[in-house]
Image: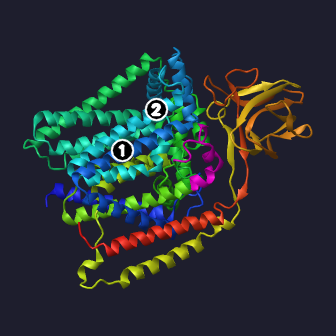
Amino acid sequence: MSIRQHTMTLFGGLISITLLLTGGLALLFPVTFRIDHNWLSPLAIALGTGIYLGTLGLSFRALHRISSRQSQWVAVGLWLLLLTIQGWVAVSWVAAPRADLYFVHQQALDLLHGSTSWPAYFQTYANNVSFTILLSGLLRLGQGIISNSGVWLNLLQFIWLDCGLLVVWLALRKRNPARANLWIGMLITTVPLYAYALNAYTDVYVLPFMLFAIVAFTQLKRSLRGPAIFGWALLLGLSLTGAYLFKANYIVLTIAALLLLWLIPLAHPRHWLVRLGTTVLIVGLLFAGIAGNHNLQQANGYHPNADQALPAMSWVAMSWNPAHYGEYNRQDATTVIHQPTVAAKKETATGLLHDHLQQLGPIGILGHLFRKARLFLATGTFDAFQINSAFDRAPHWYRQHRSTADWLLANWCQVSYLALILVNLGWGIQQLRRRHLSSAYLLGGIFMMGLVAFHVVFWETEERYALPLLLLLLAGAASGYRQPRNLLRWSRNRLTWLPLAMAGAFTLTLGLVAWQNSALTTHQWVQPLNAVSQNEGRYYQNHKLAIKPHHALSQPITATIAFNKIIIDRGEQITGHLRLTNAQGKVVWRSQGTKTLLAQSIPDQPAGRYTLTLTNQGTHNLRVVTAPATFPLLPKSLLGHPNQYLRLTVQQYRVGPILTQNKFWLLFATIWLGGLLIIDRFYWYRRQI
């Protein structure tokens, strides 16, 4: 083999090793310190993965055996089902802009109303400027079409995401309609994509660009005619540029594409000309996009200030803090932000990194790399249940049973994630054995390894940064799924004992799994549900409102579910008292004494409208954290203070098991029946595809 072929094989082997290690992390070390916790045991996850793979195999078998006419109808049905579910989710759930989204949404509204002044937040986090300008344009476009801007953005985000999904579906359909339909079938059950489509941030906007780039790259490789080559190269360059402008870490995708462009064989006889021309086009479009983006920002009144921006080293430093797993660390970030000049910021960040590495030591560095890799790769939810911390609109059943619903969906995500990893691992090993590696597999795999190296070794680490891997795994599973071997084909006899033995082993294993996870029905877990959530005011701005002595501040709230706990800001002690009145003006609860904690357990109160009043009984001004906003952070603002909202959480605090006995056994009975059906179909259905 040539050096080029050896290099491609090496990349293929590294991709398989990365998938193998990722699968091990997903099975044995899912993250438990974030919002997703109380995972099923590894044996349960493995068993669920087997059932998922069996269902995938039966689905592929069925899709492969139908006629082309039937396949078209199946495709129409699957697309209609996907679009119906997306439409229902888009209308039923509206996420409340929180944390970074709060600043982005507020500034987008300011731009919409003609203001071109930018708050200090955007000097520190300049990566959100371009998206804010885009969001302002989308909100302007939606005026007069849909009154609820949240629903409007949800629909736009689903439509944009579907553009990328459609391009992959069309590419797969040319090869094999069964694989195209399998792709849509898997997407229907992929929970994180629905969650991220409700989140008006860059994570979902960048995904279609990645899919466009991969499809364009594979088509460019096969093209023979000049116009087709130019068209695919142009789409590739535009997609890579768009992805980079939305999220800078996608520069890894550009590097992967350029690297692979000079490695893989091209169909065009003048391959050197295609390689050189495409490289020049990609680099030119990238620099043109950066320049155009800079001009767009200036046209909207944004002028960067280097003395206020966070230097790159600060992100590296905070990711190596031994007290964390590599995620965003507010304490380290604040330390750097408070430095007055860019030189002082760089010096402080470098000092923090040096201190962290010295504290870790050689062995600690290896352990910290494992912790960062675990956070980045081990969880199949990709932070889907944490990115939308509060909802302005959600079905009542979901609010009431959110902890149970999120637990079930999180474990489903973990099962499907591990299954997708195994399918892609099998596909990669098969390609290595055949010594023929798909260009799409290589591009996606090199991008995956680059993203892992970028975030695990160098940069800040979050689960959501790994979201592109989910679509890569789904596309790889649709492209590379292979039927397992039929063990009956070597036997002349029917071997009736084999499926019975498999069913017996499965039943015994499931019984062991039920015993391992029995704590879900007996252990008392803390399960707070938010009836009201407004946590803005401290992040970055630390905005406060003063209450004069013997004066009061009242915040109207609308509790969506029953509640029994109120937390204002961090629950500090004040000299004053709290009072809660219902919609009829009746006082339903008041605190006792003059020294009051701002975290109070109260008698159970039904859902409804209330007013929470905080009275200062001290001799000095009482400063409480509030958040300014021209859009509703709560249904109503503070009385007497328009566009100001108190920082508070109202909860239904409860302690109990994750699942009742009935739900627990219903879940395992469903798994048992599904497993038996899959065993029956695979071992009695002898026909080979």
Q: Residue at x 33, y 54 (%)?
A: 182
Residue 437 lies left or right of residue 393; in this view the side is left
Residue plotted at (53% across, 17% down): 117
Please state if 301 lies on the left or on the right of 565 as rendered.
Answer: left
Q: Which residue is mark 2?
A: 127
Q: Viewer-proximal residue, 79 or 338?
A: 79
- Residue 359's disc is none
* Residue at position x 43%, y 21% in the image: 297
Q: Position of residue 71 (x, y in %)?
A: 27, 51
| Residue at (65% x, 34% y) in the render | 536
Most distant residue in the left direction: 269
Q: Secondary structure at mark 1?
A: helix
Say if the magenta span includes residue 385: yes
The residue that mark 1 highlights is 79
Three-letter residue code for mark 2: Asn
Q: Amino acid at mark 1?
A: Trp
Residue occupying the far right of the picture? 593
Residue numbers of the magenta segment: 384-407
Quarter of the image for residue 15 reads bottom left
